[in-house]
Amino acid sequence: MIGAWWSGEEFYLGRKLHGDCPPVIIVGTDQGEEDWVNSLRRAGLPGDVDPDMESTPVVELWSQEQGLALNNEGIEAIREVAEEHPGALIIADSIRKLVVAPLGIEEKESRVISPLQKLELELAPYNVSMVYIHHAGKGRAGESPIPAGAGGTALPGHASNMIGLQKVSDRDDEHRVQVWIDGRMGRESKFYFDSSVDGFAPLGDGQDIARVERMQKAEGALTEAQEEVLLGLREVFVVESLPATSEQLCHHIGGRYLKPDGSAYLPLINTKLRALATKNLVDRSTQSTRTGALVLWSPVQLPSDQAYDPF
């Protein structure tokens, strides 16, 4: 976001960027200098610091090597830089490395926000914006960012807004990230972006992705017979590009769905199709004919090409 802002972009991941990019102060003791350089370069910024903001908005960077903490000395060091760069955006990465480990304060303790309050009080005259990075509690990554934070409720209560970031799935090749926004600054919302090696790209509000995820989960719970019918229906639909009747599907799959005389075993196939319909994997429609209503079945279509296709 900072890279896009600095380069003059008006939007980032579909969100409006307001005004000019401010000075950026990174208090980033959670990772080493080399990792920060790589992160900055990936964002289209030079991997260095420029207090004059001629080549980069990053005016100061404390990495793991400096070992800065939010004690009196650390807060004063940050204050001195903020005084030189009023209106700065300050990124504190992370609370665990800046407060918990060096100061010996447990995340579940209410006093974990005391160093944050002291820092913000010292920085108040300089009109800065603070961004704290915090890690989710183990086993709670899928929840809203308010309860998901490791520890107690002090940190969510202190922050004006909480933004949760998590991968859509645990697959090693997963590059879709869900952004979950919650807090006092507005109503809860979600959107998704692609974090592939080529950069970050918005994936919409998540409706298509959520639909694919539900389909994957439903398919994972199918019986062998239900899966056979679903795959058969998809095959017919690909060839014909039209919905199929139960009788057409019986003849396509064959085997148990055909009686000894070669006629379709309709009750058996219809049971499977109705079960798939309740899982929102197939659609049922009715077409009027001279002899009555004709029931047609089709597989639920995957979202548009812009959505992630797992098949």
Image (cartoon, rainbow, N blue to C red):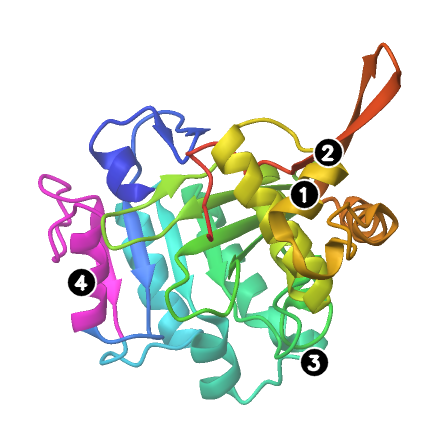
The span picked out in magenta is: 34-63
Earlier sequence position, callout 3 versus callout 2:
3
Q: Amino acid at mark 1?
A: Leu
Tell me which corner region of the image, top left, top right, bottom left or bottom right, holds residue 225. bottom right
Is 182 displayed left or right of 76 in the figure? right
| Cα distance in 3D space between marks 3 and 2 | 63 Å
Image point (87%, 20%), residue name: 293
Q: Which residue is mark 1?
A: 249
Of helix, strand and loop, which one carries label 2?
loop
Of helix, strand and loop, which one carries label 3?
loop
Q: Which residue is mark 2?
A: 245
Is the Cβ of the residue at disc 4 closer than 8 Å to that at disc 1?
no
Earlier sequence position, callout 4 versus callout 3:
4
- The mark total stands at 4
Q: Amino acid at mark 2?
A: Thr
Q: Position of residue 240 (x, y in %)?
A: 52, 30
Is the Cβ of the residue at disc 3 closer than 8 Å to that at disc 2?
no
Q: Which mark is residue 38?
A: 4
Q: Is residue 210 visible?
A: no
Crowd class of label 1 (few under 14; some 14 to 19; many from 20; radius 10 Å)? many
Is the Cβ of the residue at disc 2 closer than 8 Å to that at disc 1?
yes
Is the Cβ of the residue at disc 4 closer than 8 Å to that at disc 3?
no
Of helix, strand and loop, which one carries label 1?
helix
In the image, which is nearer the foreground, mark 3 or mark 2? 2
